[in-house]
Amino acid sequence: MDKLSFDDAFELGNQFRDAAIALGDWRIQHRGSLSKAEWDELDSQEILLLNTASSLYTSAIGLALADGQLAMERLRMSVKEAKAAVKHITALKQALDLASALVLLAGAVYSGNAASIPSAIVALEDAAETIVSGTDSQGA
């Protein structure tokens, strides 16, 4: 088992931060169509994700990844895909689903819970795929 290095943790922190900023940009672009409660909910998710990203920067993570480099590459790619999916969000539900999946994965990485990372990656990939494919275009 390989350990997640400080450089890897820093890179993941950057990716999570970038995804949070992209979600925040989406929130701002759609402020006219969001209720106060919806705005606040997205804001809360964005702040949680930014705080977790910041924590990743400052922690000396020694998280063991079961599949070594393959797991790290999948981590990187799933966050990049999520960030790209933000451009395809058409409904608040999609934004919340993506934000929640990002927070779940960031929390799993930050907590060092290697057992929960694979399911968190799958949840993030599923949320991103649903958005990009438009299979949940009805939204909330």
Image (cartoon, grey):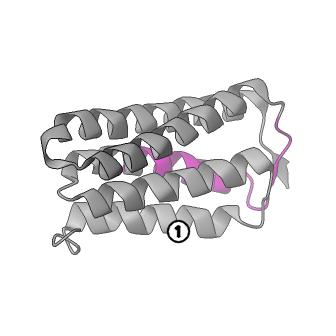
Residue visible at 51% across and 52% down in the picture: 102
Q: In which quarter of the image is residue 6?
A: top right
> Does the segment drawn in magenta span residue 18?
no
Image x and y of residue 121, in percent:
56, 62
In this orientation, does residue 108 appear?
A: yes
Three-letter code for the amino acid on which mark 1 is drawn: Val
User: Seen in the image, is 3 located left or right of residue 118?
Assistant: right
Image x and y of residue 14, in percent:
54, 29
Q: Which of 36 and 119 is in front in this view?
A: 36
Q: Which of 28 and 103 is in front in this view?
A: 28
Image x and y of residue 7, in percent:
71, 27
> Does the segment drawn in magenta span residue 79?
yes
Residue visible at 41% across and 50% down in the picture: 41
Quadrant of the frame with the N terminus:
bottom right
SS for dot 1: helix
In this orientation, does residue 69 appear?
A: no
Quadrant of the frame with the C terminus:
bottom left
Q: Which of 85 and 96 is in front in this view?
A: 96
Q: In this view, does 44 lie above or below 56?
A: below
The residue segment tinted magenta is 61-81
Q: In which quarter of the image is residue 118?
A: bottom right
Q: Residue under circle 1? A: 122
Image x and y of residue 70, in percent:
64, 55
Residue visible at 56% across and 51% down in the picture: 103
